Image: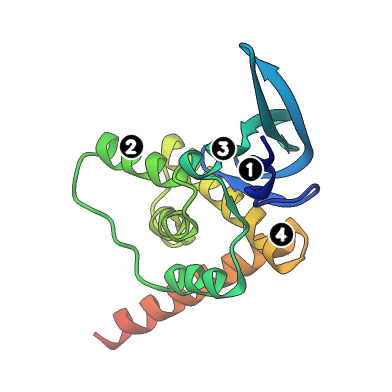
């Protein structure tokens, strides 16, 4: 049992990313007996969903749980937001599954690709309900991680993300004007 204490990657009150739920805060590190086996667990609280998740310390790697992205990774994500959208010409249901998979992957780069690809400028056609839902879900997760990484409010993080997307729109407008 002592061995697992050495394996603790995360600390109390640390924010982490759990792939299928987004950013949560470690509120406790407890030992519980489950089916006759003692397990050490991270207790993670997801404020927006009012949900608590218990993750065995030994299963952290296999679940894909990770620390909040560092500045370099956030910068890479912002670079992706400024790049051109890459929309495949496959059926919407197939693309929607791919977007959902990227959102739930816990990968900030994949998340920024979804935000970039589903973002609509005022001059573009209206989004369908499902497109808007996926976009808002991806934007929310990205904003939560950016806010925790940079120590800013979520509304500021959304503003930063939208500024990056606007730079992409300006680049696209300049290219189409030059053609």
Q: Nearer the viewer, residue 32 or 144?
A: 32
Q: Which residue is mark 3?
A: 58
> In terms of secondary structure, where does tag 4 sit?
helix
**Mark 4 vs mark 2, CA separation in Å:** 28 Å
Q: Is residue 132 above or below residue 36?
A: below
Q: Is residue 26 left or right of residue 105?
A: right
Q: Nearer the viewer, residue 2 or 53?
A: 2
Tell me which residue sits at (42%, 45%) in the image: 127
Q: Which residue is mark 1?
A: 3
Tell me which residue sits at (71%, 29%) in the image: 52
Q: Is residue 88 left or right of residue 57?
A: left
Query: Which residue, as the protein is rendered here, is positioned at the far top?
Result: 35
The numbered mark, 3 or 4, whose residue comes first in the sequence reads 3
Residue 147 in percent (x, y) is at 70, 61
Task: Please tell me in which quadrant of the rendered image residue 71 appears.
Answer: bottom right
**Mark 2 vs mark 3, CA separation in Å:** 30 Å
The numbered mark, 3 or 1, whose residue comes first in the sequence reads 1
Q: Is residue 146 above or below residue 58?
A: below
Tell me which residue sits at (29%, 88%) in the image: 178
The numbered mark, 1 or 4, whose residue comes first in the sequence reads 1
Looking at the rendered image, the disc whose residue lies closer to the viewer, 1 or 2, is 1
Looking at the rendered image, the disc whose residue lies closer to the viewer, 3 or 4, is 3
């Amino acid at each position: 049992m002592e061995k697992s204490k050495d394996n603790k990657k995360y600390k109390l009150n640390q924010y982490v990313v759990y792939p299928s739920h987004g950013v949560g805060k470690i509120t406790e590190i407890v030992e519980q007996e489950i089916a006759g086996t003692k397990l050490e667990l991270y207790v993670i609280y997801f404020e927006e969903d009012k949900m608590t998740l218990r993750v065995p310390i030994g299963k952290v790697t296999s679940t894909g749980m990770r620390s909040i992205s560092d500045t370099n990774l956030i910068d890479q994500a912002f670079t992706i937001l400024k790049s051109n959208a890459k929309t495949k010409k496959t059926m919407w249901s197939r693309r929607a599954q791919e977007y959902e998979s990227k959102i739930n992957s816990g990968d900030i780069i994949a998340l920024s690709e979804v935000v970039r690809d589903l973002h609509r400028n005022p001059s573009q056609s209206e989004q369908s309900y499902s497109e808007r839902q996926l976009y808002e879900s991806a934007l929310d997760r990205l904003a939560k991680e950016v806010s925790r990484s940079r120590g800013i409010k979520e509304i500021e993080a959304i503003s930063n993300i939208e500024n990056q997307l606007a730079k992409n729109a300006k680049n696209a407008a300049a290219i189409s004007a030059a053609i």
